[in-house]
Image: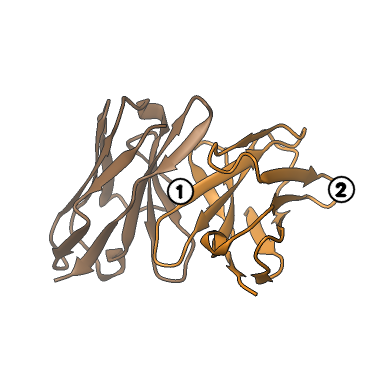
Chain colours: A brown, B orange
Amino acid sequence: EIVLTQSPGTLSLSPGERATLSCRASQSVSSSYLAWYQQKPGQAPRLLIYGTSNRATGIPDRFSGSGSGTDFTLTISGLEPEDFAVYYCQQYGSSPEYTFGQGTKLEIK
Amino acid sequence: QLQLQESGPGLVNPSGTLSLTCAVSGGSISSSDWWSWVRQPPGKGLEWMGEVYHDGRTNFNPSLKSRITMSVDKSKNHFSLKLTSVTAADTAVYYCARDGGVALGAFDFWGQGTMVTVSS
């Protein structure tokens, strides 16, 4: 099973700043199958990024994804008040299996 | 627009069976997509439980394989989850979700989630 480790656990930033969230895999992940989600309290997760760098429908272009192999990054440029939430990375592997990282909480500083 | 809606008992007795259904609207469950269950214990992260295809094929999280079944009812356009021998550790919000469309290997549509508590 591929384990995804997200860092930092909590990120404190101000609106307008740039957020950089990391997701590290215990073994190589296909870049076609690495996704990012945003979850707000009491809501279901929302798909932001799939295939490492493709924005899902309706996702603003301040959200971007990058990476390859075992290291992946979600960048949010110019934080808006509605961006403060928990973010999860997720991979799909060949077993098949889907695994999630433990999440990064993005909070207002 | 595809919509998913979970339903089922909110309270299950320890050692009992948890049964949930996910109704799919705005699209067909017989499309070329896989349909999954994902759960989230209170205050914790997300765990993929398993997936089902419209022809009945399934794949499960190895940690749940001995306790989980999933099925599809094409006539009702819904799919179901059964989890046996539940304990307090199975208390969670249960989401149904679609893996498919353009975003292969990712869940692009989710239900709102349903809270299930295991307690006597």
Look at the numbered discs 2 and 1 and tell me whether their residues touch, using CB distance below 8 Å: no
Against A90, residue B95 (above or below) is: below
Query: Can residue B104 be seen by looking at this rendering?
Result: no
Q: Amino acid at mark 2?
A: Ser
Residue B108: give its label: none
- Estimate the x, y position of residue A70 in percent, counting from the top left: 26, 29
- Judged left or right of residue B40, residue A103 is left
**Label 2 to label 1: alpha-carbon separation:** 30 Å
Q: Compared with residue B47, is residue A32 higher up or lower down, i.e. above or below?
A: above
> Is disc 2 surrounded by few (<14), some (14 to 19) or many (20+) residues within 10 Å?
few
x then y, percent, for residue B68: 66, 45
Q: Residue furthest right?
A: B75
Badge 1: chain ID: A
Q: Amino acid at mark 1?
A: Thr
Q: Is B109 in front, or is B18?
A: B18
- Identify the residue under disc 2: B75
* Dot 2: element: loop
Which quadrant holds residue B118? bottom right
**Label 1: element kind:** loop
Mark 2 chain: B
